[in-house]
Image: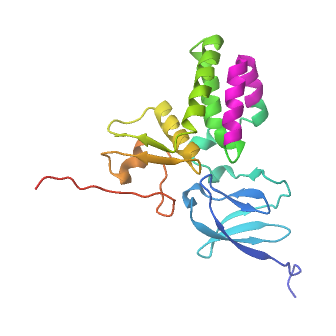
Amino acid sequence: MPDEPYQYAEWKRCRVNLDYHIEIAKHYYSVPHNLVRQEVETRVNPKTVESFLRGKRVASHLPSTLQHRPTTIAEHMPSSHRRYRDWTHERIRSEAAKVGPDVDTLIDVILRSRPHPEHGFRSAIGILGLVKRYSQERVDAACARLARLIAVLERVNLLILDDWGPEPLTADQRRDLLEIVDDRYDKGSLLITSQVPVSQWQGRADDFMMPPSSNAWCVVLDCAAD
């Protein structure tokens, strides 16, 4: 006789979202971030939620009944997201309110625009960090202008980033690029042109991911002279 009684389990095929989570019963469970847009098989029973890729288990979680909330393992996160895991939604909103009303409004928009608020932490914390270099009044005024710009960009069907990458990006520039890519997902089209081979993009922008299974097209033009 087995040591434990048999437990019924359900299997489900899941596509890994851009935020490296899968959805089970309206709850979101993380898998390793390099599996973005790939399909995994998930086994669900009363004790565990396990995900498998080609028969190999890649993630295991305790089930949760909280709807529209994520369960995230830190090791599944790209390094740019792990930097902010000690922050909470409540802490960010409290710090934003201390700076000014326009900072608070903009950060609220950023957090609500993401599938999971945690994935807007990078932008929100970057904005809060500006008060180390500028006055609160100046940061608050800049956030008011940025909020108006975001409203305009959200009405644009195609956003073009032309000829990026000839020079290495700074940490702030990498963060901005990743936020643009994240924000455009499922909202509008994004066209990126570059003279840098796609194979070298990740080295120039930390955690820049474009796996073959993503909903992206890569067009390479060979313009070498004869």
Tell which residue pokes out farthest to the left in this image. Answer: 226
**Residue at screen point 62% across, 61% down:** 16
- Indicate yes or no whether the magenta region holds residue 40: no
Looking at the image, residue 217 sits to the left or right of residue 67; the answer is: left
Q: Which residues are magenta?
A: 92-113
- Indicate yes or no whether the magenta region holds residue 103: yes
Q: What is the quadrant of residue 38 in the picture?
A: bottom right
Q: Tell me residue 200's x, y (percent).
A: 37, 49
Looking at the image, residue 212 sits to the left or right of residue 46; the answer is: left
Residues 36 and 57: in front is 36
Q: Tell me residue 108's x, y (percent).
A: 72, 32
Residues 86 and 119: in front is 119
Total residue callouts: 0
**Residue at screen point 59% across, 47% down:** 187
* Main secondary structure of the magenta stretch: helix
Tell me: residue 145, above or below residue 42: above
* Colour option used: rainbow
**Residue at screen point 67% across, 49% down:** 74
**Residue at screen point 35% across, 57% down:** 219
Q: Tell me residue 123's x, y (percent).
A: 61, 33
Q: What is the quadrant of residue 1 in the picture?
A: bottom right
Looking at the image, residue 179 sits to the left or right of residue 45; the answer is: left
